[in-house]
Image (cartoon, helix red, strand yellow):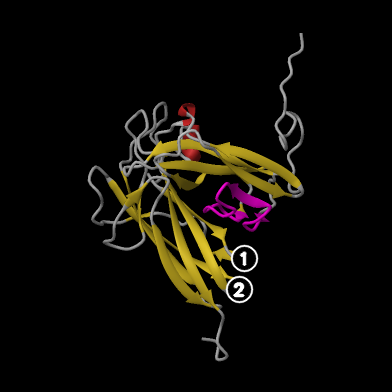
Amino acid sequence: MLASRALLPGQQLPFEPAHDSGQSITGAFEGWFPNPDGTFSLLVGYYNRNQKQQLEIPVGPNNRIDPGGPGQGQPTHFLPGRQWGVFTLTVPKDFGEKKLTWTLIANGKTTVIPLSLNPLWEVSPFIEASGNTPPFISFELGGAFVQGPRGPTAALSTTLPHPLTLTVWVADDAKVPLGAQRPRTSPVTVAWSKFRGPGTVTFANNKPTVEKAEIKAPPATVFSGKATTTATFSEAGEYVLRVVANDWSGDGGRGFQCCWTNGQVKVSVKAATTDGR
């Protein structure tokens, strides 16, 4: 007897070859979690089915979250492949059984996903079954450390064509996920990417090495470090850069929704003056 399974819109056939470009992007609802103030966070990523094509989809008819949108903090720049828990939406205490939808139209292909507080989708992004917790991130030496998907934010500015220095300080408990062997790599890795903005962002190294550093780190952490890179912008405007810190659980916590930390840097890029400064 032959068995079949319905394909979702934009989903590839099991043996269809991967494509470099021309395919859809689908939002990915990772789940939801409660916040200390009684509100809730919806954790959302996406899957860009293109192996090479990065897309710019401005907030609007082709990139909207409803109701209440179209813009509710979602990215407008989409990297290839599966991107886990890229942003969160905060919904009120009385959100109840309401739903949001995220619509994306890429390469002429439309996808829509629901976002809700369905009890089956509650996740624990701050602690894994083994006791592992997400890395901490700080954008300034001696500054506050934050962990988890909501992460810290910072604001910087630069003037064309000067590169902008980006530094993060990190700390982690260096716990090994269940079923894994202790890696020989650094307990924390970081990766930078463009989240929003009008032009191209070029990083000197979007995955800079985390160098061990002696800093005042949060309690219960055993590793602390620092990672620095630079970003160059092709044109003036307002940008948002995302940095994600992963521990040994890797991208997306191996599908268990723990343990990584997001950070966002808002960058105001000014045009060069007539004297080039």
Counting from the top left corner in percent of width and height, residue 62 is at 68, 52
Q: Is residue 142 or residue 196 the one in the foreground?
A: 196
Q: Residue at x 25, y 52 (%)?
A: 217
Q: Quadrant of residue 178?
A: top left
Left or right: 135 in relation to 8: left
The reply to whether dot 2 and dot 1 touch (C-beta < 8 Å) is yes
As measured in the structure, the alpha-carbon distance from the residue carrying label 2 to the one carrying label 1 is: 7 Å
Q: How many marks?
A: 2
Magenta residues span 55-77
Q: Is residue 73 visible?
A: yes
Q: Which mark is residue 200?
A: 1
Q: Is residue 104 or residue 53 the one in the foreground?
A: 104
Instruction: Identify the amino acid type marked 1.
Output: Thr
Counting from the top left corner in percent of width and height, residue 204 is at 53, 64
Counting from the top left corner in percent of width and height, residue 71 is at 56, 55
Left or right: 3 in relation to 35: right
Q: Residue furthest top?
A: 1
Q: Is residue 186 magenta?
A: no
Looking at the rendered image, the quarter that the N terminus falls into is: top right
Left or right: 1 in relation to 150: right
Secondary structure under tag 2 reads loop
Instruction: Identify the amino acid type marked 2.
Output: Glu
